[in-house]
Image (tube, grey):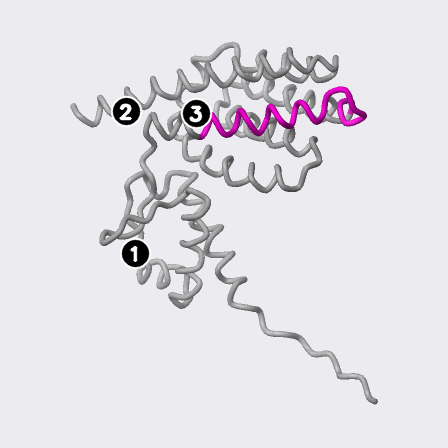
Amino acid sequence: MAAKSSSPSRIPRVTFASMVGERIRSNIIEGVLAPGTQLNEVELAEAFGVSRGPVREAMQRLIQEGLLRSEPHRGVFVPIMTPDDVDDIYLVREAMETAAVRRITGTPRAAPAYKTLDKIVRAMEAAEMADDWNKVASRDLEFHSALVAAAESPRLGRMFTTVISETQLCLGVLSAAYDARGDLVEEHRRISDLIREDDTEGAVAALKKHYDDGVVTLKRRLAARDGASAG
């Protein structure tokens, strides 16, 4: 029986949905689509040069990630972060990263984890010295993503990807406050050093303090934003 000849397959529509999703995600994170902006399916399809199907699929995925919010009878919007959102996001992040720390420390994972985290901390320190707070924010997320990845748990990693996407919604607020947190680099360095020392409880405590401080800073910035809007 003759083998079937191979031929190039058509690019599935889902690929277009992924590409559109990445474009929308970037526009949200970079502030091109501001919080509260309503997304129009027809306009997006025209802007990206695709049919409405891929745009609809992309928007549904971003809704699941928390980067968009669907409001019945109104439409789809870029979320406006609230203090309750901040509390919930950081509650989940702390739980996930605490689980990662406990899985890393006291195992052979600790040494390579420290090596990766220390490199990121050094890059964060260089960005801070250069007064590049956008890069500090980027390295911050890179540090926490690397921490979870070092736990070598695919399921934890998948869950964290969704939460980190929502965290990026905070960047517009948080990056403006990064320069007010002079201990930020030191907090990350302490977490990585405690992992190197296999001090599980110390690393968990340092992680909690880091997040407690972050939540306070974010809420302060949100309050300032809301006050400016009211004025």
Q: Check disc 3 and give the amino acid type.
A: Ser
Quick one: which residue is furthest to the bottom in this view? 1
Distance from disc 3 to disc 2, alpha carbons, whole Å, reads 13 Å
Quick one: which residue is furthest to the left in this view? 231
Say few, some or many: other residues with alpha carbon within 10 Å of mark 3 (under 14 / 14 to 19 / 20 or more).
some
Q: Quadrant of the image for the C terminus?
A: top left
Residue with the mark numbered 2 = 225
Looking at the picture, does residue 155 appear above or below residue 214? below
Q: Which mark is residue 40?
A: 1
**SS for dot 1:** loop
Marks 3/1 in contact by CB < 8 Å: the verdict is no
Marks 3/2 in contact by CB < 8 Å: the verdict is no
Say few, some or many: other residues with alpha carbon within 10 Å of mark 1 (under 14 / 14 to 19 / 20 or more).
few
Percent position of residue 143, x then y: 61, 26
**First of labels 3, 1 by sequence position:** 1
Percent position of residue 226, x then y: 24, 25
Q: Quadrant of the image for the N terminus?
A: bottom right
Task: Say which residue appears at 41% left-offset and 66% top-offset.
Answer: 53
Marks 1/2 in contact by CB < 8 Å: the verdict is no
> What's drawn in magenta, residue-wise?
89-111
Percent position of residue 165, x then y: 48, 38
Q: Is 67 or 50 nearer to us in this picture?
A: 67
